[in-house]
Amino acid sequence: MTPRSSLSRLLRPNSVAIVGLSQDLSKHGGRVLSFLRKIDFEGPIWGVHPKTPAIEGIEIYPSLKELPSSPDAIVLAIPPPAIPRVLEDAGKIRAGGAIIFSGGFAETGSAGEALQNKIYGIARVGDVRLLGPNSAGIIYPSARSILSFLTCLERPKEEIRSGPVGLITQSGGTGSYIHNLAAERGGGLAISVSTGNEADIELGEVFYSLVKDPVVQTIALLFESIRNGPKFIKAAQAARVAGKAVVACKIGRTKTGHEIMKTHTGALAGPTQTYEAVLESLGIVSVKNPAELFDVADIMARTSIPDGDGVGIVTHSGGAAIMLADRSEELNLSLPNPSKYLKKRLAPYLQMGALGNPVDLGGIVSQPERYPEVIRLFLEDPAYDLVISVSTPHISAHSEGRAKNLIKLAQESEKPILNLWLAGDLGKKGLDILRTAGVPTATNPESLLKAVEGMIRLANLEAEERAEYDVLKANPEVLKRCASYKAAQRHILSEGESKALLKGIGMPTLQGEVAADLGEAIQIAQKIGYPVVIKALSPDLPHKSEAGGVRLNLKNEDEIRHAWAEMMHDVTTYAPSAIIEGGLIEEYVPGTEVILGIIQDPTFGPIVLVGTGGIYAEATNDVALALPPVTEHRATRMIASLRGKRLLEGFRGAPPADKEALCTLIVRLSDIAIAYRLNFSEIDLNPVIFSGDEWGIADALIRLAP
């Protein structure tokens, strides 16, 4: 297929044709016309209707082919069955793009899906970019272009403003709500694009376009699913290079469209967890609802990335201080305690308050000038890279002066200052002053702290990306063995085969050998040294323990004889048709267990997993995921996010595990995910055991890519 045309003509049109425009201006086509007029659209607007109704100030043509020139944007305000013919005409006149408002396509079943595929094919042949179906259109105030029917536009012209946030949504009504939020606060959106069913134009492509748009400072995404993972990742990486923060709200719970292999990694990496991991890996802030989406994006658009992660919080309410301290800890924000020197400087400003971080000034009824001076002291201290100013209820007469002082501090400081305004309606004047000045301000603590978390994550990502990264080269011998397995239609490997490949790519496996029969098992055990483990080898039994195919801590020959006979009986009873290739005899090394793995996600590609290991992996679902490449710093964060991290620190007398060595293993697995991404569909290492002073892979299963 040939490359598609860019979105520029559709996003910033110089001419618009409204197909289906009638004298009833309350319909979608008429609403688009009225909004284009309201925003003072500067180019020609043509109506298209076979009956050529008379509409004041608008030239009406019976078809697109009669237009005086090729329109940049076509609005299709017509029933679905009429769309294919109109799109054929659009291609013939070399139109830029078309927006389909109506539903009745893939969301309705097979007949609707067939119609959607048909119109996409027609648009593709004519090189007409298609937005929708089920799109609520495009609103771009600074370009004086409104190609939408949304109710948020039913406001005075002066209230349809531009702002710093670009919005992409798969839901039109929610986009209208976010426009209303922005207008209510005296602002607006830079642009909003509703992608609908995404027959052609997908979220990732619009995302990339907004990264390149100078009007857009931050990007807000509201979506149910991502159809093109590589495009999405490319856009997110471009946003980081451009210094534009991205905030996302994922709605719905979709099922992945691929067969999950019966392994721990496949079962543990559910769709929601995968999306969250991808967003975090890309430096995208994840939020829970549309209001929070706009809050966080707007805050991040109005501030800069801090140089470090030290956060200082200044308030004059003990309750607010406690609340913010609690939530900051949950978000892993660093709140350094004031130094002795800073405490000495702060002490004169406190009135029955508390010296800490957050600092509580106490009474603020008198001497309101104390508030900005304390903020200034935090800004001057090198321990703090970012300061949060928290304004709880205060004398309303002080609000204006406080807001102006905060604006002055923001203008003078090289460090970011974020304002949390919890002063209620009596402090509205100060809030309005802050918002008019464009300084970062929130009235929701969760939104503000999520923005801070996102800014610090971006700062960490920038540091990680500046570090040198060694690219792992694939081992030719391993590639050759993978090819031979595939040629033999062997895609799910036995544990012995899996471990042989792992050794070839530098992963630490336990000492062991494959035994074809009991006699060989006894010889291998004597060579390794007791105690040992025996495991049944079969490509048909990914979960050997469930089939009775594992025997642990065997201390002598008699125990091996008994275990071998019992194990083979249990396995053949559990799965009579399973191919049994013998047994794997390994050293027995009890210790602290984790699970490591790689999954091949159908949307985003390889994803690295670490979690609490052993037989309880699926029951606890205590895992962390990340897109490769995974750095040492990110691997450390993955381990720190596990609920079971205490087990690694030495629990109930057990020796602490080497977390640095575990980080190295995670990074190595990430390297493997990149170097062998076309060969390995899944790697499941469970458990990986820390025993003595090293980590070793006790069980492994590899699925090769088809």
Image: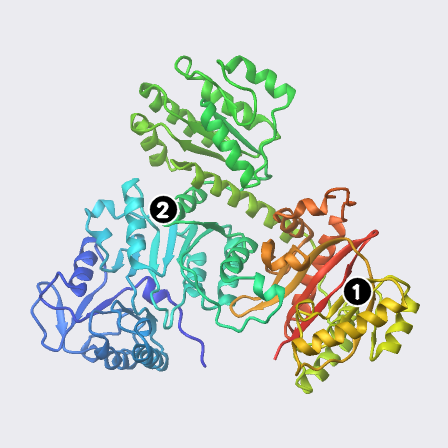
Image coords of residue 521 (percent x, y): 86, 74
Where residue 255 appears, as percent x and y from the top left, is: 46, 66
Of residues 77 and 513, the one nearer the viewer is: 513
Residue to which mark 2 is pinned: 291
The answer to which of marks 2 and 1 sits earlier in the sequence is 2
Q: Quadrant of residue 109?
A: bottom left
The residue carrying mark 1 is 509
Q: Quadrant of the N terminus?
A: bottom left
* Helix, strand or loop for disc 2: helix
Residue 380, image quadrant:
top right
* Image spot of residue 99 (x, y percent): 28, 68
Q: Is residue 405 above or below residue 600?
A: above
Q: Mark 2 touching mark 1, by CB under 8 A? A: no
Q: Secondary structure at mark 1?
A: loop
What is the quadrant of the C terminus in the image? bottom right
Which amino acid, mark 1?
A: Thr
The residue positioned 90% from the left and 68% from the top of the image is 557
